[in-house]
Image: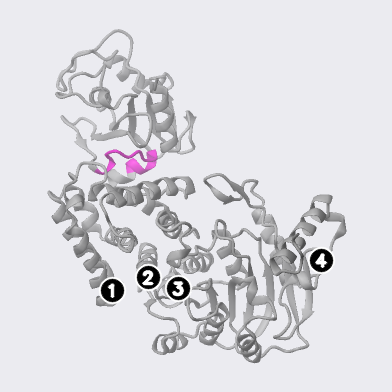
Amino acid sequence: MATEQYTESLTLREMKCVLGDNGRGFVFPQGDVSVVDKIDILLKKAGGKPIKCAIDDFTQGGNGKAKPEYIITMNDDANTIIVVECKSAVKKHVSENLDNPRNFAVDGVIYYAKFLKEEYNVVAIAISGTTLANMKVDTFHWLKGQDTYLPLIKATDIILEPKNYIKLIRGEKLQKNYSLDEIREIAIEMHDCLREIKVGEAHKPIFIAGILIALYDEDFCKTYASLPSFKSVMSSIQNAIETVLENSGIKSDRAAYIKQIFKTLQDNTKFADIPLIQKKSINWYIEQLELKIKPMMDYADSTVDALGVFYHEFIKYSGGDGSGLGIVLTPQHLTEFMCSLAGVNKNSRVVDICCGSGSFIVTAMSKMFKDANPEEVERIRKEQLYGVEFDDGLFTLAVANMIIRQDGKSNIYKGDCFNVDIIGEIKSKNINVGLMNPPYSQTDKSELEFVEQLLNVISIGGTGVVVVPMSCAIGTKFKDVRERLFKKHTLEAVFSMPDDIFYPTSTNTCVMVWKAHKPHDSEFETFFGYCKNDGFIKRKKLGRIDHYGIWKNIEEQWLKLYRNRDVVDGLSARQSVKHSDEWLCEAYMNTDYSQLSQEDFQKTVNDYLAYLVKAGDVYEG
């Protein structure tokens, strides 16, 4: 049988709090606030909750003092406190007349608030239910000394971190730490809800990105929760999208495309029939994105592409791992490593001609900001970041990603990266860094042809860093394009990456570093890194994670080997190569036998036998 303790644990988890000191505030359980005299006196004045008590009745309750589940004080706002009342059963969330504080969560928290507001601005939160799926949440704001309270409509059926309740009241941007678990939970829930109302797979990503773009319009953020109907909310979203895209310099046809998707969704009768105050309504989606996803994106110094991760998690429930839809999300730590290989700094001018949701651009921008002054930051946003994306949904997400980060004029081009006009325009921008994860076996172009096109748009001596399938580094494949690349560009380095770095997809990859428009010298020694261990391990439901926190040290080792061009047995090599040679460390490095075990030997034998069987060189009888 569910108990109130489940609700209390859920509340602390969603608030990202523990009992006691939380750095920015303090969580007191069960009215145990004896160290704060003023609160303690008010709780004693309230007394134990009566069974019946009208809102305007300030008569003291039962004996003793009031014991709400939690009282939260804020270090940076001594005049505001948060009071939380929990009930395990949703049917005990609110009474008809709000006059039964002992048995109902909303009634109880308002009862506490009407005493506490004598000395404080009170955020009163009523939470009922033992799981996120069945949870009911209502939040109220009762200003010090006022006769009545106001509901915080946006904080309905959602639990925020304490600091974000204060930001929500003040109209400030909410901020929260990146949480892959939370992203996945929201993505699964939203996807399933949209499937229930028969929203097409092609429209889902535009729906998500469109709302995030609209949320960048301040007027929309302030007014959407008070609009009276589904139709008025959908119309407001369309107007906000048009305003934001126009201010961001996006072509009008792109705004028209996104608005058209919302007009189509507006005709969805199942969607229109869901009351705005209910879960799964249009307002619910807006609130979830505004209060949970967007705050992760609003950290200006964050390199994490929270929108890209959310979209990847969201879409993979439509098509397996998403690869069938052209989506291969580059792992966050890999985008950071590749930016470091490229030497990205505040003076870089960066392009990704297959930018997807903008992961590389977001990571590069954050690195460029680190040593930049405000004037340089503005120039970086407006003039030093470029992307090209063919897919409508991914393009919209990339635009949303950049708008959310206040990039000024979003230089994301919609179209084919082999389009002469687009490439001609980008070439005029004096780009000196190219970053890319091209489509894998999904177009009539090979991955190395995308690499060739990327290097084509980079200025002389610029650096291109790409992650491609290992097949691109084997001398027997793509001979013509490999020869063309060596005639024009220098292969500076190749890193063999972990076999499962793109888990759950199974493509083995390598990272190549190229120097643009400098023909490869056959005497030049290319650096090869054997980077098979990045410290990440697979965990159920989480995928690959840096569980032991060792990635940063491993990354530093890889970068140091590369910068010094050091040769270390088992880790690196230097070798002069031609276009027809193998471009992988495995072919040239010496083995460090001290690191080998019996298991390593057995695995190698098994892998080799499997290869022979697959190749047909072993008789199976």
Q: Amino acid at mark 1?
A: Arg
The circle drawn on residue 380 is 3
Question: Is 308 displayed left or right of 582 in the figure?
Answer: left
Query: Looking at the figure, which quarter contains the N terminus?
Result: top left
Mark whose residue sits in front, 4 or 3:
4
What crowding class fits label 1: few (fewer than 14 Cα within 10 Å), some (14-19), or many (20 or more)?
Answer: some
Residue 127 seen by the camera: yes
Mark 1 lies on a secondary structure that is: helix
Write down the region rendered in magenta. 154-166
Mark whose residue sits in front, 3 or 2:
2
Q: Are marks 1 and 2 in contact (CB under 8 Å)?
A: yes
Q: Are marks 4 and 2 in contact (CB under 8 Å)?
A: no
Where 197 sits versus 253, above or below? Answer: above
Mark 1 or mark 2, earlier in chain: 1
Where 388 sits versus 319, above or below? Answer: below
Whether the magenta-drawn stretch holds residue 83 is answered as no
What crowding class fits label 4: few (fewer than 14 Cα within 10 Å), some (14-19), or many (20 or more)?
Answer: some
Q: Which residue occupies the foreground of this view, 400 or 26?
A: 400
Q: CA distance from mark 1 to mark 2?
A: 10 Å
Q: Amino acid at mark 3?
A: Ile
Q: Which residue is mark 1?
A: 254
Q: Which residue is mark 4?
A: 568
Q: Which residue is mark 2?
A: 395
Q: CA distance from mark 3 to mark 2?
A: 20 Å
- Relative image position of residue 550 (x, y in whole percent): 67, 51
Q: CA distance from mark 1 to mark 3?
A: 24 Å
Q: CA distance from mark 4 to mark 3?
A: 38 Å
Q: In this figure, which colouring scheme has been used for the structure?
A: one colour
Q: Amino acid at mark 2?
A: Phe
Residue found 49% across the figure and 77% down from its top: 351
Mark 2 lies on a secondary structure that is: helix
